[in-house]
Image (cartoon, helix red, strand yellow):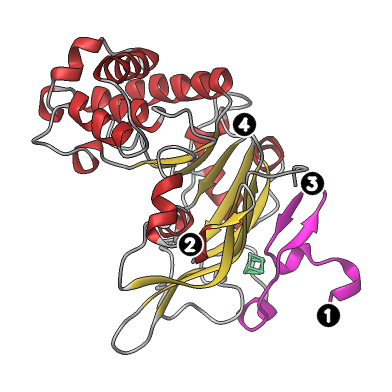
Amino acid sequence: MPDAPILQVTDLSVEYAAERQDVRAVDSVSLWVGKGEFVGVVGESGCGKSTLLFAIAQLLSPPASIVAGSVSFNGQNLVTMTEKQLNVLRWRDYSVVMQSAMNALNPVISIGAQFRDALQAHGRFSAADIADRSGEVLALVGIDRVHLKSYPHQLSGGMRQRAMIAMALLFTPDLVIMDEPTSALDVVAQRSLMGQIRELQRTLGFAVLFVTHDMSLVSHYSDQLLVMYAGQVVEIGLTRTVFDTPAHPYSRGLLDAFPSVRGERRRLTGIPGSPPSLGRPPSGCRFHERCPVAEAECTTEQPELYPVGEVASRCLLNRPPAVKG
Ligand code: SF4
């Protein structure tokens, strides 16, 4: 863990209230993000990663709610803050970029007016200052300032995502939380936007918490990686280490499912089946129904996160000898 993480999430759990039984979508997740660090969160759809991000950003709405844990951001617990207190921090100290800018941006207000509203929510700025800053952040993401007059539908998908990122940078926050910001784009636009995010991050010094289902996308950009399965963290550690020597069978499965530009040519294999229902997760290890190396005890014994070299892995095969058997 970095000396003074700007974000420290501890044992965070989120449940969706349901008629028959509440569904725990995020189960006791802990993570940390250091200043200027890029942390990736990966896993298949339905593993709880977007819910985790919304919970960290304090953007959950009923029936979802945080039922346990804390989210310490620059030393303040966001979970216990009022909406009014959170509104002071949003945009200014941390901001969020959603999966689809078309849904996040207001379709009937120009980009410039949306930037102005976000700026005015946090202070008194002259019209000239607003125009300057708005043009400046738009230029940072490679969009000409004339598009401040444009409406979201007048921009391409890639430009809309860039405009969302520009808006997230209006105050140069300490942390930008991103929920699959490139998933609606084609591969070339995806790579270009990712490169731009990384470059901006290096130049401006903000930290990024980035959710994606695409392992290859984070491989080049993230410093630290968190792999989620069925609402739990199954592996966490330095991205390079997880990619070079994945400790958890699920991480190995995700890595085997996409082509590598390095090393020998190999046949791609997916992970058979699909993630379990979070309403009724399997007994024992939640991955046992799909795990190629499952053993008998995996169906009954719940693994914890065990340290394995530089990572931690939630697999019984990684248990330290002292606690085996
Ligand atoms: Fe596979 Fe068992 Fe490890 Fe779970 S605990 S990942 S089922 S080997």
Q: Kindly identify which residue carries mark 4.
A: 36
Give the residue pinned by disc 3.
310
Label 2, label 4: how far apart the Cα atoms are:
24 Å
In this rendering, would 286 be left or right of 119? Answer: right
Disc 2 is placed on an element classified as: loop
The residue type indicated by label 4 comes to: Gly
Q: Residue at the location (54% across, 21% down)?
A: 204
Residue toward you, 207 or 183: 207
The x and y percentages for residue 114 are 22, 32
Read off the residue under disc 1.
Answer: 325
The amino acid marked with disc number 2 is Met
Q: Does the magenta stretch include residue 302?
A: yes
In this rendering, is residue 6 above or below 288? Answer: above
From the top left corner, tell me how far across and down residue 239 is, in percent: 65, 38
Q: Distance between the residues labelled 3 and 4?
A: 21 Å
Q: Provide the residue designation for mark 2.
A: 81
